[in-house]
Amino acid sequence: MMKRTLLIIAGLIVTVILFINVSGNKFEEKVQREVRQITEGTASAPAQKLTYNQLKILPEPVQRYFRHVLKDGQEYIRTVRLKQTGEFRAKESDQWVPLEAVQYYATKSPSFVWHARLKPTPYTWIESRDIYHKGIGFMEGKLLSAFPLVFDSGREMELSSLARFLSEAPWYPTALLPGKNLVWQAIDSHSAKAVINDAGYSVSAVFTFGDDGEITKVTSEDRHRNVNGKKERIGWTAYYKNYQELNGVQIPSEVEVEWNLPKGAFQYAKLKVTEIRYNEQ
């Protein structure tokens, strides 16, 4: 009887391990399929280049920023593949959880896929993917890549995702150049507001610039957070720092982000860029 019980237990363990492995492969396949969707047609798009003459119509701190981070004649960034490490927590009372992530962007039509793995313990992980493309945005998290943990979608998620694309643009600065979907509004010598439109949605963020032109802070009122089962529009801030030249572009290698709650700021993510690639075929 004992031998039979052990065999059953061993069989169950093997089954669970196989299920987790297969689920992990399927999760990765979904991510790669979504990456192909957002980047489809970008390689064949005509290369567009920046000239400093384009900047004359922009607020002064925005001009200062582009002259600092981009070169005259810089090719527009069409696609991005970015690797990150860092820490995340969902609530103030939670411990920080280490994470590793790969994020893909397409800039012609604001789009991204974020694929992250969080490790709350040495032997467990949560696999997460956040997607925004053509006005559709959602996020999914699975324990051990297999067991559904969280899923979020809908209008608030889509507005938040578009605001996220805008606020993360210091990693792909040409997406902040003015165009049919993006305009700048002057505020003062160290800040300006960017407004982006996509698929019927419109969101904005205020960018703060240092004396050297670097974006040091981005704030937005167009992101939503789940609070007691309800999605609430809450102020949000990102602090960018430690600029480095990567692939010919000056970008911040670190960011810390927080919710601006009535009782005070709640920092929930600290991320570091470890690798970035532009316009890969």
Image: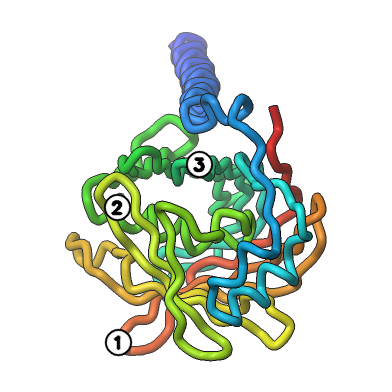
**Residue in the image at 20% along x and 66% along y:** 228
Q: Quadrant of residue 80?
A: top right
Q: Position of residue 62 (x, y in %)?
A: 59, 75
Q: Is residue 135 left or right of residue 18?
A: left
Which residue lies under the disc numbered 1? 262
Name the mark nearer the viewer: 3 or 1: 3
Q: Nearer the viewer, residue 106 or 254?
A: 106
Q: Tell me the CA gap for discs 3 and 1.
A: 36 Å
Contact (Cβ within 8 Å) of mark 2 with mark 3: no
- The residue located at (75%, 49%) in the rendering is 275
Numbered tag placed on residue 157 in the rendering = 2
**Residue 209 percent location from the top left of the image:** 61, 81
Alpha carbon of mark 2 to alpha carbon of mark 1: how far? Answer: 21 Å
| Element type where label 1 sits in the image | loop
Q: Amino acid at mark 2?
A: Met
Q: How is the image coloured?
A: rainbow
Which sits earlier in the primary sequence, circle 3 or circle 1?
A: 3
**Mark 2 burial class by Cα count in 10 Å: few <14, some 14-19, many 20+:** many
Identify whether 42 is placed above or below 194: above
Residue 38 in the image: above or below residue 169: above
The image quadrant that residue 217 belongs to is bottom right
| Residue type highlighted by circle 3 | Lys
Q: Is residue 54 left or right of residue 198?
A: right
Number of other residues with Cα within 10 Å of mark 1, as a class: few under 14, some 14 to 19, many 20 or more:
few
Packing grade of label 3 (10 A; few <14, some 14-19, many >=20) is some
Can you identify the residue that label 3 sits on?
Answer: 108
